[in-house]
Image (cartoon, helix red, strand yellow):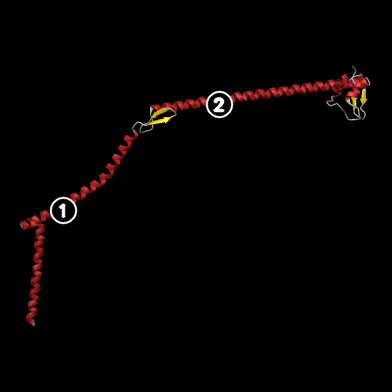
Amino acid sequence: MEGYNKMSQEDYREKIEEHRQAINIESEQETNPSRMTRSELHGKKNKNKKNNHKNRLVTLLAIIFILLPVSTLIYYGYFMQDENSKKAEIDNGGIQIETNDNGQSKDATKVSNDDEKLTKKEQAEKERAEKLAAKKAAAKEKAEKEKAQQKEKEDAAAKEKQQQIYNEAKAAGRLYNVKQGETIESIAIKFYGSDAGVAIIKEANGITGDTVSPGTTIAIPAQ
């Protein structure tokens, strides 16, 4: 039993020693590659080459992924600019307008200026029409005012004349009290002998109709 334990301890020590030597060898190879065997050195070089190749491939793919959308945007922008710069004829009331990528051209500017001139002309015509209408309205208002003033003067003169005739008739004792059933015509025939005095009686008393209310006092002017 003691012999068996002794052998086990020796085996365990041998394994530990082998493991330690292996670690020392590996550490020495890493720190001093010149002591590596040719096959080991060649394998390490191949491994480094594979890693470098892999890194280059990853870098290339990254560059492609970056350049692809940028190239697409550049192509799209150039294509759209080329399309927009092409000549476009627009039928605008018989006027052809050439447009480019910025939407401006000499023809477009000319049309814009023509429209502006037309707008100014229309505005000027509108202002002239408004001034003419205002002038006509003012003239009409003035004429109506003058007409009203003239009518007032005529009415005042007629009323003054009527009052004068009435006063003269009253002074001469020629006032008459209208009776039931009498008309201006019958009164004129009574005082003047004919219907010719109807106008005289109406003018002197400001009567417009052919009859007056019974009991009304009227003047009978002298012929």
Q: Residue 47: give x, y in percent of width and height.
A: 13, 55
Q: Residue 74: give x, y in percent of width and height.
A: 29, 40
Q: Residues within 10 Å of mark 1 (few under 14, many from 20)?
A: few
Left-right relation of 181 to 84: right
Residue at the spot of label 1: 51
Q: Is residue 60 above or below residue 142?
A: below
Q: Residue 48: give x, y in percent of width and height.
A: 13, 53
Report the residue that reaches farthest toward the top.
223
Three-letter code, disc 1: Asn
Three-letter code, disc 2: Lys
Left-right relation of 138 to 89: right
Name the disc covering residue 223, or none: none
Residue at the spot of label 2: 126
> Which of pointers 1 and 2 lies earlier in the amino acid sequence?
1
Q: Residue 18: give x, y in percent of width and height.
A: 8, 68
Which quadrant of the rendered structure holds the C terminus? top right
Q: Residue at x 28, y 42 (%)?
A: 72
Question: CA gap, disc 1 to disc 2?
Answer: 86 Å
Q: Quadrant of residue 101?
A: top left
Q: Quadrant of residue 125?
A: top right
SS for dot 1: helix
Q: Residue at x 69, y 22 (%)?
A: 143
Residue 13 visible, this orientation: yes
Q: Quadrant of residue 114?
A: top left
